[in-house]
Amino acid sequence: MSPTDHGFRPGPVPTWVLTGGRTRPKATLRPETLLTTMAHRPVPDTTTVQKRELLGLCRQRLSLVEASAHLGWPMSVVRILASDLIDVGLLVMVGDETPDHNRLETLEKLLAGLRRL
């Protein structure tokens, strides 16, 4: 007897299953946020297959949007899984940690310089 004999049809896993029903990550992650794994950090046995796949991809620096494309999962799912891995110290954000107010100041200076040209 096959699973379809009882009306069951295998299909894509709903995204809420992958995220444990959550819709918002704890960490603020933009699509261009670069992620990488913590070297030599043991992965707990309780880590899901999906989180392990994401960790495998992030051995090399990879942006959130690239990870989403490689895995074929919606970015919202990858964002939540990455946030979970950051919370437990298995994944880190790489790059510019400049606060937004400093970025605005830098952009204003750049704009002023361009206007002087």
Image (cartoon, helix red, strand yellow):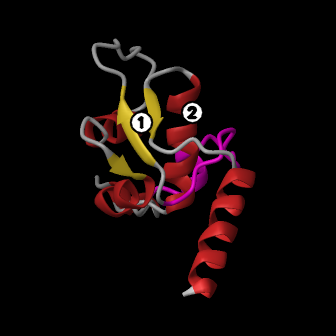
Q: Position of residue 42 (x, y in %)?
A: 34, 12
Q: Residue at x 61, y 45 (%)?
A: 98
Taking 67 as reference, is 42 above or below it?
A: above
Q: Residue at x 58, y 45 (%)?
A: 80
Left or right of 100, for residue 66? left
Residue 23 seen from this side: no
Residue 28 seen from this side: yes
Query: Looking at the figure, which quarter contains the C terminus?
Result: bottom right
Q: Amino acid at mark 1?
A: Lys
Residue 76 among magenta residues: no
Q: Nearer the viewer, residue 60 or 56?
A: 60
Left or right of 6, for residue 3? left
Q: Residue at x 54, y 21 (%)?
A: 88
Left or right of 103, for residue 68? left
Circle 2 — which element? helix
**Quarter of image, res 59:** top left
Q: Nearer the viewer, residue 4 or 83?
A: 83
Residue 23 among magenta residues: yes
Pointer 2 residue: 84
Q: Position of residue 9 (x, y in %)?
A: 41, 63
Pointer 1 residue: 51
Q: Which mark is residue 62?
A: none
Taking 48 as reference, is 74 above or below it?
A: below
Q: The magenta stretch spans which residues?
A: 13-31
**Cβ atoms at labels 1 and 2 below 8 Å apart:** yes
Circle 1 — which element? helix
Residue placed farthest to the front in the image? 116
Q: Residues within 10 Å of mark 1 (few under 14, many from 20)?
A: some
